[in-house]
Image: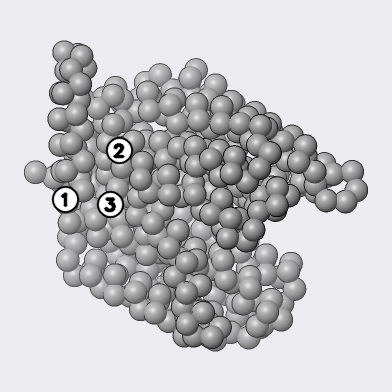
Amino acid sequence: MCAVGVCARLSYAMARTPVLALFAVALGAAPEMIGLIVGISTVTGIIFKLPSGALSDLVGRRVMLIAGLAVFALVPFAYLLVSGTGGLLVVRFVHGFATAIYGPVAMAAVADIAGARKGELMSWFSSLNIAGTLCGALLGGYLLWRLPEGGAAAIADFHTIYAVVGGFGVLALALASTRLGALAPGDLAPEARRSLRAIARRFAEGVRTIASDYRVIVTSSMEGLQNMALGALEAFLPVYAVSVVGLNAFQAGALWAVQIVATLAAKPLMGRIADRAGRKPLIVAGMALCAGAFVTIPTSDSFAPLIALALAFGLGEALVTSSAAAMVADMCERRHYGAAMGVFGTYFDIGHAAGPIVAGLLLAASSGNYFAAFLPLAVLLAAGTALFAFTVKETGNGTDSIR
């Protein structure tokens, strides 16, 4: 699962950052069209992650993983046919089905395997996926730098890069097809598999059971709120660092790198601690750390404190993300893991999509005052954390289930 995840995430990230926006620019896209092209795949995830996860509870993890990985493997080659912004938008939307199908199903498959070690093993899986994402972005940027023979990249250079993207997708599909034969088979009896009505009934039951559970919704919202702050930082921390503090582009990039490295390094250990000591305290501590670092960033006016705050935010992110998904899985019967991870992934995507938009609107309303823009988001994180702390009771490691 980890090897498949690294290849798949490397492929997807290479298609996205920084290649996608620059491809749109090369095709003549206006700024608003660039934003739509970059963000449209997140919309796919918001809509389809819950159905994908719930369907994997019925037909089995392997079937749905192969379906998602087939999108990773095949759709990148459609970029080679793109010659205009409209075509790029359509291909990007379809490419979003890769993570919309694969993401929640892969997390559910790891939860199936992990047993009582959900925090640790899901954190290892997530950290390696993040590493694959980081490598994909670096490789895409490197190829975009090396391929052009003088001057700006041509359309043919982007086509070459997307062919490489497809190659990594094919590798992920090949690994899954040959090495993942023993995943959870699904929860439909053989006779029920022949009845579309039975499948639809069981599908609706799984979605209703998970989507109506208050604990699952509130716990998933912790990841969504944390990801909202992360999305805001991804969009505006570099701008703040360069335009307000006066740092150079390399230093601004270092802030992002420190945050990522802190999260990667801390997640597996935090997951192991959560398995033994409980998940809820880590989530509360991580959310508090993220909110504090987030609201303090606009008060910093030099490189050293910004590095320290980026490190603190990355550690807070590790605390939250190492425990939230595992806690959601603990709340559910195993037969509903897919639907639970679908709900979790939906909140993740909503937060990630909303962060830059909300922060941008707040910055516009405050005439570029970063503290005034960041403070409401920090308050929202604090309020959500308080709601979670006082209303959600932690269950045992999978010992409790939804009735």
Quarter of image, res 104: top left
Quarter of image, res 339: top left
Q: Is residue 214 above or below residue 382?
A: above
Residue at horizontal 56%, vertical 64%?
A: 234
Question: How many numbered discs sit on the rendered protein?
Answer: 3
Q: What's the amino acid at mark 2?
A: Pro
Quarter of image, res 63: top left
Q: What's the amino acid at mark 3?
A: Met
The answer to whether the residue labelled 1 contacts the one labelled 3, judged by CB atoms less than 8 Å apart, is no
Q: Position of residue 317 (x, y in %)?
A: 45, 62
Q: Position of residue 315 (x, y in %)?
A: 48, 64
Residue located beneath label 2 in the image = 51
Which mark's residue is nearer the viewer, 1 or 3?
1
Mark closer to the chain start, 2 or 3: 2
Cα–Cα span, label 2 and label 3: 21 Å
Mark closer to the chain start, 1 or 3: 1
Cα–Cα span, label 1 and label 3: 16 Å
Q: Which residue is most to the left?
A: 403
Disc 3 is placed on an element classified as helix
Q: Is residue 186 visible?
A: yes
Q: What's the amino acid at mark 1?
A: Ser
Residue 212, numbered label: 1
Residue located beneath label 3 in the image = 327
Q: Is residue 117 visible?
A: no
- Within 10 Å of the Cα at label 1, are there few (<14), some (14-19), or many (20+) other Cα atoms? few
Disc 1 is placed on an element classified as loop
Q: Position of residue 41 (x, y in %)?
A: 49, 46
Q: Is residue 232 above or below residue 337?
A: below
Q: Position of residue 337 (x, y in %)?
A: 27, 39
Disc 2 is placed on an element classified as helix
